[in-house]
Image: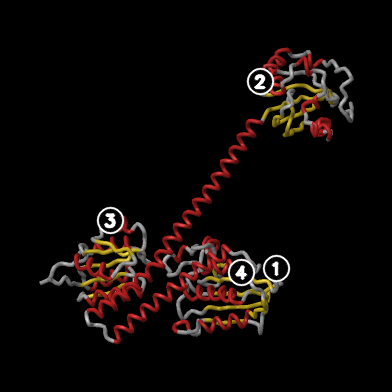
Amino acid sequence: MTIPDHADDSATPPDLPVLRSDVAFRLLVDAVQDYAIFLVSVDGRVLSWNLGAQRIKGYSADEIIGKHFSAFYTAEDRDANRPMRVLRKAIEEGRFEDEGWRVRKDGTRFWADVIVTALTDEAGQTFAFAKVTRDLTERLAAEEQRRNLLAEQRGRTAAEEALLARDRFLSIASHELKTPVASLQLAAESVIRARAAGKLDEERLVAGIQRITTSTRRLGVLLNELLDVSRLTADSSPLDAAPVDLVSLVAEIAERFSDGSDRGRIRLAAPDAAVIAGDASRLDQVVTNLVDNALKYSAPPTPVDIEIRQAGSGVEIAVADRGLGLDADSAERIFEAFGRGANAEHIQGLGLGLHIAHQIVLRHGGRIAAEAREDGPGATFSVWLPRDQATAE
Amino acid sequence: MTAHVGSILVVEDDEMLRETLGEVLADEGHEVRGAAHGYEALECLDERGVDLIVLDLMMPRMDAFEFREHQRRRPDAATTRLIVLSAARDIETAAERLEADGWLAKPFSLIDVIELVSDLLPERA
């Protein structure tokens, strides 16, 4: 038996023995309400109808038996000849399951799960199809509701995390800012009190002013960090792009850090020059923050190794220390604002240096990453910057 | 006026604040020692007891609560009076939990610290 290419409503439905046999079974099928269970002839005509089919599709048995089953499909599906393709698939595979929109008698749509089984005789010839259709509209709605709830939940978690980050910021910022303010206030008031008591000698005055100056400078640095972050976050205008030699920039920064107990700690391995297009003062900030970070998180006299090399269409700067190191979780979080590593909770500073460096690198079309050293304790921070921002990877 | 002077241990990780506070208190006639963190503070207490501890709430390595536990287990220092310093908003709650005798929110004025310290020290003839 062959399947006609297109739906044909004119021929009379065949009278098949299966329809007359097994009355008890038919009664059972007829009584099922949750599933539309019916037979379809090989040319696509409805041969039987149960209560579930009536309930789901809206047709009574009288109205639909003998009609083509493509009536249950949407106009688009009918145009695409989907009904007959479904039958052909069922013949090829014995059974075909399909999910999609179907149409009720009143024209409304429902989301259906349809299983079409080819019924074959002893010779292996398909003589009809059994169709079982389930209305999944409610399940679809429930799934959508669940998805919406999930999205809502995710949104709420993100909002809660943002609140936590803000609280962490307030706690760190207030500690870091209020401590030098406390020193500043005490130092100033103590000079005044010493003077009132007639105990303000030259030495005392100089020491007091030095304390006031140091605290003020520290506050200035902290405020600049805070303002930098808000500026970088708020301002998305492109950075200046002039030729910058990263080798001389890094050498200059290394020189700046070579005093006191940090003298001789920085070792630089670099080619003669590595020029990229970028904002020199911002890039200075990136390298300064990385070097400052490396020196802060490792103890003298351990070295901090800086390597500059050409890498693909850009230049890579790697800063490696032999300090506290970091775990994988921290490596992810460390570039977030106030996202200090788990082992660095109490190191002084706002924890914004790496975040600022990350923002600047991103603005240059580059990448930044942190990882634990494999050859011993410590961490390596690497920055890749495109030679030309227009050709950034 | 009776002078309320005594020995004080200032536990504060910020070197500048620790030194300034130490100098201010020394000016008032107190005998002041400083410690940068909890462990150093406990060593100081083991060496010699004090009349009063001025303790920063947020410190590296050992926080104020852990320090307080260790301090109270030392027979000679168990009842030593305590002032808590903090920049945190909930300093009052923290001070209560620590059963501190007083607290100062950073930044504080010179006169506040001088008066609070004097109030908490025993009268000396």
Horizontal arrangement in the rendering, residue A355 relative to residue A40 (left or right): left
Residue A251 in sight here: yes
- Label 2, secondary structure: give it: loop
The reply to whether the C-beta atoms of the residues labelled 3 and 2 are less than 8 Å apart is no
Residue ID for mark 4: A361
Residue ID for mark 1: A392
Residue ID for mark 3: B96
Q: How was this image coloured?
A: secondary structure
Earlier residue among tags 1 and 4: 4
Q: Relative to the observer, which residue lies in front, A256 or B110? A: B110
Q: How far across and how far down the image is residue B61, in percent?
A: 38, 66
Chain at tag 1: A
Chain at tag 3: B
As drawn, A380 above or below A140? below
Q: Residue type at mark 2?
A: Gln
The reply to whether the C-beta atoms of the residues labelled 4 and 3 are less than 8 Å apart is no
Chain at tag 4: A
The reply to whether the C-beta atoms of the residues labelled 2 and 1 are less than 8 Å apart is no
- Of discs 2 and 1, which sits in the foreground? 1
Residue A121 in sight here: no
Residue ID for mark 2: A33
Corner quadrant of residue A103: top right
Q: Residue type at mark 3?
A: Glu
Looking at the rendered structure, whether the residues under marks 2 and 1 are on a common chain is answered as yes
Corner quadrant of residue A6: top right
Quadrant into which the N terminus of chain A falls = top right
Q: Relative to the observer, which residue lies in front, B48 or A137? A: A137
Q: Residue type at mark 4?
A: Val
Q: How far across and how far down the image is residue A109, in percent?
A: 71, 29
